[in-house]
Image (cartoon, rainbow, N blue to C red):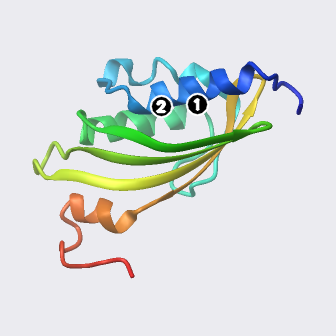
Amino acid sequence: MPRGVSRATLPRASEELATFVTKPRDRRSSTSRVVRLAETYIQNSGWTPDGRAAFASALAISRGAMPDGRALQTHMVAENNRLASRSVWDGTITQSGRPVDFTSLDFFRIEDGLIAEHWETVDWVRVYQSFGLLPDQVVDA
């Protein structure tokens, strides 16, 4: 097993990640589980800076835009210190009242029981449509 990962650590991290993503939260509690991120957390999305504080800020912004938002994890695979998850998101955009329905794929590296690194891909066409930034007729081929 890699450094900091035991047979018990990865399933626990997977379970906490599932709870973190699927449990609706308000802004006050949205950062309460950020402590599960490593101090040197690396975000590889390109739109959020590295670090716990940046993650907490991005999470608060997304929860503000979609407070009833939730992610149903349809697939989760964990091996060694890596975790992959496919989530289907739904909720309502606060400003417009439009429904949200999109998919994301998230990949995590776990070290010492904490999320150390994150990669993601998001169905941005559906996200932009949910925010009214693209017409509903646009499809991703």
Task: Characterize the local packing of mark 1: few (<14), some (14-19) or many (20 or more) Cα atoms within 10 angstroms.
Answer: many
> From the viewer's perspective, is residue 55 above or below residue 85?
above
Residue 27: quarter of image: top left
Residue drawn 19% across the image and 78% down it: 137
Judged from the image, the secondary structure of the residue bearing numbered disc 2 is: helix
Furthest toward the left, the residue is 97
Image quarter hosting the C terminus: bottom left
The residue identified by callout 2 is 56
Judged from the image, the secondary structure of the residue bearing numbered disc 1 is: helix
The residue identified by callout 1 is 52
State the residue in front, 65 or 88: 88
Image quarter hosting the N terminus: top right
Q: Point out residue 117 in the picture as x, y percentages from the top left corner.
A: 68, 41
> From the viewer's perspective, is residue 46 above or below residue 55?
below
How far apart marks 1 and 2 lie (CA) works out to 6 Å
> From the viewer's perspective, is residue 40 above or below residue 125?
above
Determine whether, in the image, residue 123 is placed left or right of residue 52.
Answer: left
Can you tell which mark lies on residue 136?
none
State the residue in front, 126 or 116: 126
Residue drawn 57% across the image and 58% down it: 46
Task: Characterize the local packing of mark 2: few (<14), some (14-19) or many (20 or more) Cα atoms within 10 angstroms.
Answer: some
Residue drawn 52% across the image and 49% down it: 48
Determine whether, in the image, residue 65 is placed left or right of residue 45.
Answer: left
Q: Point out residue 110 in the picture as x, y percentages from the top left corner.
A: 72, 33
Q: Is there CB contact under 8 Å for labels 1 and 2?
A: yes
The amino acid beneath tag 2 is: Ala
The amino acid beneath tag 1 is: Arg
